[in-house]
Amino acid sequence: MGKTPKNPGQLTDALLQSPSYRRADQDIEFLNRDELRPIRLQLELLKPEMIQQEEGVRSTIVVFGSARLVEPAAAQARLKKAEAALARKPKDRDLLRAVAVARQQVKLAPFYDQAREFGRLVSSTCQIDGRCDFVVVTGGGPGIMEAANRGAADVGAKSVGLNITLPHEQTPNPYITPSLCFQFKYFAIRKMHFLLRAKALVAFPGGFGTLDELFETLTLLQTGKVTGLTIVLMGKTFWEKVINWPALVEAGLIGDEDLKLFHYAETAQEAWDLVSKNHGVASPK
């Protein structure tokens, strides 16, 4: 035990500096304790919900896709760099693979432009006369997410970014509306916010994160936990190569009717036509 200061002034200072004296709502160390996880979960649910209400966001449309897909020009530049490195060491296996990957990225790069155009189409159609319907919401990162937020920014519209704390530093892309840029610690609460106001989900080519979010949404639709949500998969060739849907049906693991839970589209306009038709939104003339 520490000695009690004899000087009353020292005693008062010691009391004021004691961690126990901090107000609970201002004690970060206390709020980060394991026992306070339920409170942190509630705060992560409440803060974005309240702010979106204040910003007038009535409904959203979620755009998922790879953080690694870049604009066509940037993809071409990466390919040239990889080819130049390979030319110096033509038998290097890692460089051979890097070139192969870069070529695939060039093929997928047009989806960046389609995601940007989709964000522009949705936002210019639905954010008029002060309304905030079908507001684009992404994971807030680079790649396809950046493109969708950028499309909304192109027409001066609002868009949402739901960023998350990761082991490797991740910063939000610069096209998100600042007042609608959120940071999460918990994936579970972040996923809830993706779907709380969502009328549609448009999934571009992506990796584990995209697949995780897509299959969770499909499961919620299949089980009736979520209704009235339109799912559009961008790029039929990609998705049918990555996921063998018929094999799941043939094995009796899903039903034929489950294949009606989603649609395919190749362009931003096709995707928006599907969503707008399903939700009775008039497309611009």
Image (spheres, grey):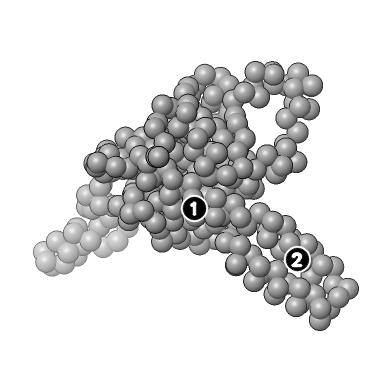
Residue 73, percent from left and from top: 60, 67
Which residue has dot 1 on it? 116
Residue 130, percent from left and from top: 24, 42
Q: Is residue 112 left or right of residue 150?
A: right
Of the image marks 1 and 2, the number of the one nearer the N terminus: 2
When the figure is inspected, residue 279 is found, relative to residue 150, above or below; the finding is: above
Q: Nearer the viewer, residue 281 or 245?
A: 281
Q: Which mark is residue 98?
A: 2
- Seen as rendered, the residue at the extreme bottom is 88
When the figure is inspected, residue 94 is found, relative to residue 264, above or below; the finding is: below
Q: In terms of secondary structure, where does tag 2 sit? A: helix
- The residue at the point 11 percent across, 64 percent down is 8
Image quarter in which the N terminus is found:
bottom left
- The residue at the point 75 percent across, 41 percent down is 241
Residue 21 seen in this snapshot = yes
Residue 104, percent from left and from top: 72, 57
Residue 172, percent from left and from top: 44, 58
Q: Is residue 244 left or right of residue 122?
A: right
When the figure is inspected, residue 50 is found, relative to residue 100, above or below; the finding is: above
Q: Nearer the viewer, residue 55 or 280?
A: 280
Q: CA distance from mark 1 to mark 2?
A: 27 Å
Going by the numbered disc 2, the residue's amino acid type is Ala
- The residue at the point 56 percent across, 35 percent down is 232
Q: Which mark is residue 35?
A: none
Q: Is residue 57 left or right of residue 169?
A: left
Is the C-beta separation of discs 1 and 2 under 8 Å? no
Q: Nearer the viewer, residue 124 or 197?
A: 124
